Amino acid sequence: MTRVSVNEIKEKVEKLALKINVPADLLPGFGQLKYEAHPYIEMDNRGIMFFVISERGEENERKRTDNIDELLYWIFSGITFSMASNFELKNRIEDKDSRRLMFEKQEELLGILNNPGDKKKMKNIKEF
């Protein structure tokens, strides 16, 4: 396990976000809650990274990892899903399953990020 700081994670996320023009409001918070029901990243003193979503003071989701690539996948899976959903809404095609267009766009965005695990995981989504 290579130990990274929250600031280093933030820098990696921001660098990747530039590749696909992520709107700032889709980026997670780092070290603390950004706003309700929005992901944020925490790290404990052992270097374990947490992907957290809280709303009204209660955690809805908390994933933990010591693998930066896994954390980046969690972050960008949600970001690209939101971006792909917005893309589909603006480009809806009558008589076509909207999920297909959305998943194709999400796969395209993850492909641009060039994280080797993404395409494998996205393959499972396409089979939906």
Image (cartoon, rainbow, N blue to C red):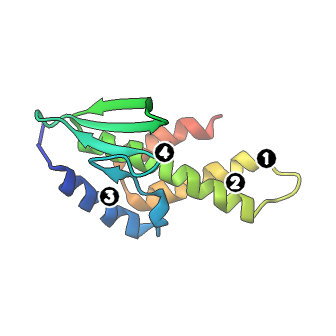
Q: Are marks 2 and 1 in contact (CB under 8 Å)?
A: yes
Tag 4 or tag 2, which sits nearer the N-term? 4
Three-letter amino acid code at the position of disc 2: Leu
Q: CA distance from mark 2 to mark 4?
A: 29 Å
Q: Are marks 4 and 3 in contact (CB under 8 Å)?
A: no
Q: CA distance from mark 2 to mark 1?
A: 7 Å
Compared across the picture, whether 117 is left or right of 80 comes to left
Q: Are marks 3 and 1 in contact (CB under 8 Å)?
A: no
Nearer the camera: disc 3 or disc 1 = 3
Q: Which residue is mark 4?
A: 36
Nearer to us in this view, 63 or 115: 63
Compared across the picture, whether 52 is left or right of 48 comes to right
Q: CA distance from mark 4 to mark 1?
A: 31 Å
Place residue 101 in its image quadrant: bottom right
Nearer to us in this view, 71 or 59: 59
Residue 127 position, x and y percent, is 63, 35
Residue 86 position, x and y percent, is 65, 59
Q: Which residue is mark 2?
A: 101
Three-letter amino acid code at the position of disc 4: Glu
Q: Which residue is mark 3?
A: 13
Residues packed near mark 2 inside 10 Å, few (<14), some (14 to 19) or many (20 plus): some
| Residue at left offset 47%, top offset 70% | 21
Nearer to us in this view, 29 or 114: 29
Q: CA distance from mark 3 to mark 1?
A: 31 Å
Q: Quadrant of the C terminus?
A: top right
Secondary structure type for disc 2: helix
Tag 3 or tag 2, which sits nearer the N-term? 3
Q: Which residue is mark 1?
A: 97
Three-letter amino acid code at the position of disc 3: Val
Residues packed near mark 1 inside 10 Å, few (<14), some (14 to 19) or many (20 plus): few
